[in-house]
Amino acid sequence: MIHTPSGPIYGPRRKYKRLRTICDFGSVVGTTDPDNPAGVKGGAITCGDKNFAVADYPFPLDTPGTWLVEVSISGIEVQTDDDDSLILPGIVTATGTPAWNLIVYTGSENYTSNTNPATPTSSGTVILPIGVLTVAGGTASIANTGCGAFIVDQCAGILTYGRPAE
């Protein structure tokens, strides 16, 4: 719609599609060049009052195989009431730092399970699934579980994560 002195003019509605060439968190980056080694692209994770900038995870292209790729964060402290007897929705902080993990994948393995807080004063560990990495013939590819930053949360003591729309 365009506003003119004689009134609005309506034209055809245009649709714009955002094009993405690379995933913000979890794509394969780099080459066989030692100055730019192959790796899984890192990204941002928000967990309570912590904002982590996860570095890329380098891997060799000369080792063929297939792996589940995940990132874990331990020491997650959940919100509690004033006397620490009830778990409230939300996360306070994380004392651990993000750590990459690879699990050999033959087709039936699963990502590691979260460790939820057992009591209001205990902490937990969240696992953020990145995707299935395959290295063959000196090249790598990944089947991502999603793209973008992670936001870790919890409700009723169950750790969860989200990836906001991009």
Image (cartoon, rainbow, N blue to C red):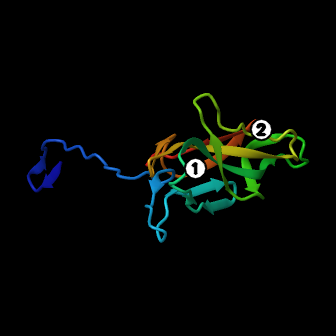
Per the image, label 1 sits on a secondary structure element best described as: strand
Residue furthest toward the left?
A: 6
Dot in front, 1 or 2: 1
Say which label, 1 or 2, has the lower sequence index.
Answer: 1
Q: Residue type at mark 2?
A: Gly
Residue at figure coordinates x 85%, y 40% from the top left: 86
Image x and y of residue 12, in percent: 13, 41
User: Image height check: is 126 above or below 57?
Assistant: above
Foreground pick, 24 / 137: 137
Residue furthest toward the top?
A: 108
Foreground pick, 49 / 12: 49
Q: Is residue 55 left or right of residue 11?
A: right
Q: Is residue 66 left or right of residue 82?
A: left
Image x and y of residue 72, in percent: 69, 49
Per the image, label 2 sits on a secondary structure element best described as: loop
Q: Is residue 77 left or right of residue 4?
A: right
User: How many numbered callouts?
Assistant: 2
Residue at figure coordinates x 86%, y 38% from the top left: 118
Which quadrant of the structure image shows residue 48? Answer: bottom right
Residue where numbered disc 2 is placed: 157
Residue at figure coordinates x 64%, y 32% from the top left: 109
Residue where numbered disc 1 is placed: 150
Q: Residue type at mark 1?
A: Phe
